[in-house]
Image (cartoon, helix red, strand yellow):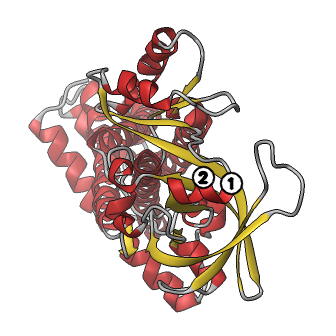
Amino acid sequence: MSLRPFTAFVGWRYVRDRRGGRFVSFIALASMLGIALGVWVLVTVLSVMNGYQRDVQSRILGMVAHAVVDGAGDGMPEWRQVLEAARADPRVAGAAPYLQGQGMISHRRESMGVVVRGIVPEEEKQVTSVSRHMEEGGLEELLAGERSVILGRELARRLQVERGDRVTLVVPRSGSDLEGPPRMRVFRVAGIYSMGLYEFDSRIVFTHMQTLQELFGAPGWVTGIRLRLHDPFQAPTVARNLVYSLGGLYLVSDWTRQYSNLFRAIAMQKRMLFLLLLLIISVAAFNIVATLVMVVTEKQADIAILRTLGASSGEVMAIFIVQGALIGAAGIVLGAVMGVLTAWNVEEIVATLEGWFHVRFLPPDVYNIMRLSAELQGADLAWITGMAVFLTLIATLYPAWRAARVQPATALRYE
């Protein structure tokens, strides 16, 4: 089989031929549009999955520590030495102490269970990006001894509070003082943050570490040390080294253990979606088989004439492969262009559709994100177009082989 200028020219003419039946033209158009639809959907879906993974990872790494040294439930009385030991590691970009516990926050008739985290604002900026996601106020407004808190946007919406409002924080008693009712104090809302992740924006409340120590009745008590690394993917190695350097007296964990199942699930979903949506392209590509078989049946006389003029069976095959490839290429290009445009504007498209139909396509309490974004990756686009081209070429082989087997004498017998 050889691809010469005249085989490409004849294949192109067959694509443009208007003398064939309308049904054949309709099947060819349907095949092209089917391939375009498959490529379009696949590019868009994979871009959305990439954007979802990027947003979830960046927001999680902006909120949680890359590694945490905990006192195994008994607190960390020598936390300052642990803090200095962690900061001595050149891979550690920042370290900060924290105190954390469960509690309940209420405003008027609304109540929510929350995680209360006591921080030192100046040092917290070294380990998280909460300060860069403040919508109102700032971490610097959390002062030692003052009863002020910072809430997530989703929690503030549920409680129907704004900056400056008063909320009631209830925490259980701890340490040796376990008898009696829970501790209850009124706090001022000093700020509101929005990380864009429902899990954080609806559950975590910040206050000053000294204020929370007083509320718990545990002066000087620290839960542990939170670390931020220059390279978050070195967290397992850094955590393992800290375990050895601290003599095994503390528990050291990292973000890859806590969220590894989430990212593995996202990667698996991406692979499964790729395989499932590839079936759309497969069905559309194999519609080309029906189109070319009907064209071969219709063009038997033309094939016989080409053979008598000296065209080889390989050149006849090339003609119909070119015809099928052109149909597929048109669909692939159209689908890729539409997919790229959709991926670039998916946030605006989804917002417009939600406004039209008054529905939330991705509820944040289910998908853990506040907005939808997309990230178009060249590798994904190359894989999609490459697989589409491969399936299209495979679909052209059988009809082209049938065309090459046409016998000139038999085809011209009744002409």
Q: Give the label on residue 189, or none.
A: none
380 and 364: which is toward the camera: 364
Residue at image mark 2: 213
Residue 334 x, y percent position in the rendering: 30, 61
Query: Is 215 placed left or right of 302 in the picture?
Result: right
Q: Is residue 222 above or below residue 104?
A: above
Badge number at residue 216: 1
Q: Is residue 4 visible?
A: yes
Residue 391 location in percent, x, y?
Answer: 43, 38
Q: Is residue 370 above or below residue 272?
A: below
Q: Amino acid at mark 1?
A: Phe
Residue 172 location, x and y as percent? 78, 56
Residues under labels 2 and 1: Cα distance? 5 Å
Label 2 is placed on what type of residue?
Answer: Gln
- Who's the residue at 25% across and 62% down the image? 16
Tell me which corner region of the image, top left, top right, bottom left or bottom right, holds residue 156.
bottom right
Q: How many marks?
A: 2
Q: Position of residue 411 (x, y in %)?
A: 41, 40
Q: Nearer the viewer, residue 174 or 318?
A: 174
- Whether pointer 2 and pointer 1 mark residues with C-beta atoms closer than 8 Å, the reply is yes
- Mark 2: which secondary structure? helix
Q: Foreground: 112 or 342?
A: 112
